[in-house]
Amino acid sequence: MHRRAFLSAGAGLALSAPLLAACGSSSSAAPAASSSGGTTALSYQLSWIKNFQFAGEYVADSKGYYSDAGLAVDLLAGGPSVATDAVAESGKALVSQSSPDFTANAVAAGAQLKIIGASYQKSPFSIISMAKPITSPADLAGKKIGIQAVNQVAWDAFLALSKIDKGTFTQVPVQHDLTPLVSGEVDGFWGYSNDDAVQLRQKGHDITVMLLADHGYLLPTGTYTVRVDSLSDPAKRAQVVAFMKADLKGWQDAIDDPALGAKLAVETYGKDNGLDLDAQTASCKASNDLMITDETKANGLFTMSEALIAESVRTLAAGGITASTDLFDMSVLQEIHAAR
């Protein structure tokens, strides 16, 4: 099942051994970049397997946007066992994709990391319903809601932010299997608007999707994470700026043409992952709704406003995760967008 490792917010509370080890072994790590023939080689750690989630990177690579910027970018596939913040902290990747909950916990454990942007301005976390539509938190009353254990912390945070009493509904433990929803065992199911919802619609099911981000759960994800010294060191910062500029260009093309990124995912970059073209295209289209907001239209793709950063810290706190606005640094994106 194509799941984002960084979306399992509950798992973010417990740092893995690899992450703790990486936080303490930066000096012995492989360099993030090297130069050869005028081209700088660097790695970007993806948060999951190569599928629709990285359409913009595929476009930037295939259209030569990275190479035009003097970069040879290695897109490192992620997965359930890859702690992406650890990869950035170790120096094995100049940039990693993560999520504020994971990065905040890594920083609390001693990692020197900053979030410099967010691809998904809205989290895809959703409650998906069928026969008994759930369109708002108030509709949870009297319903059976399927929640996976790994998402319990994020769910509790949402309930706290929405001021919903757990006693007003019945929570049912489920796995990442949509059968309980389809069979009617549960009325609502924790899933992803750009993945699970797409799968259900592809199979002809009539569903209702309540996006948690539309009801107070304000935590962008698909965040770009770098080491602090990659921003302070002029040479490293120049590489970060060049990468982000090329990546932005690729993502703008992918947003404008969802079928392009889906085709690259299915036929080239994720060709060994058994991806379906129609589903990947639909997921790319659904992801656009998470990436484009009034604020990104005003300030530029990937940017997080001061208000959104403050809301993100508040959302993290509701889940028991301590962070400050210093976790975020939008200076690279501000520099890029100001030059346009």
Image (tube, rainbow, N blue to C red):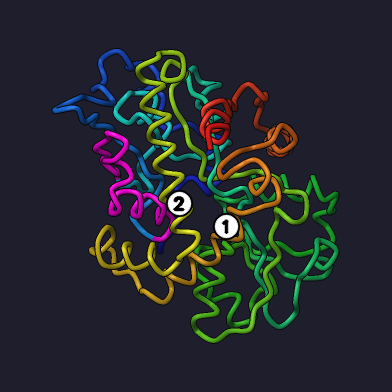
- Say what secondary structure mark 1 lies in: loop
In this image, 149 relative to 26: left or right?
right
Which image quadrant is residue 288 in? bottom right
Question: Can you give x and y, in whole percent of width and height, for residue 15 in the image?
Answer: 47, 31
Query: Given the image, on which type of amino acid does mark 1 rest?
Result: Gln
Query: Given the image, on which type of amino acid does mark 2 rest?
Result: Trp
Instruction: Name the disc covering residue 148, or none.
Output: 1
Q: Quadrant of the N terminus?
A: bottom left
Q: Residue furthest left?
A: 37
Question: Can you give x and y, in whole percent of width and height, for residue 27 in the image?
Answer: 30, 13
Verify whether residue 72 appears in magenta: yes
Measuring 43% from the left and 29% from the top, which residue is drawn there?
241
Magenta range is 52-76
Crowd tier of the residue under label 2, counting other residues whose Cα lies within 10 Å: few below 14, some 14–19, many 20 or above: many
In the rendered view, tell whether residue 146 sits above or below residue 20: below
In this image, 136 relative to 180: left or right?
right
Task: Report the Cα–Cα distance between label 2 and label 1.
Answer: 31 Å
Which image quadrant is residue 210 in? bottom right
Q: Residue furthest front?
A: 340
Question: Can you give x and y, in whole percent of width and height, for residue 320 in the image?
Answer: 68, 33
Measuring 72% from the left and 48% from the top, which residue is drawn there?
217
Q: Which residue is under mark 2?
A: 251
- Say what secondary structure mark 2 lies in: helix
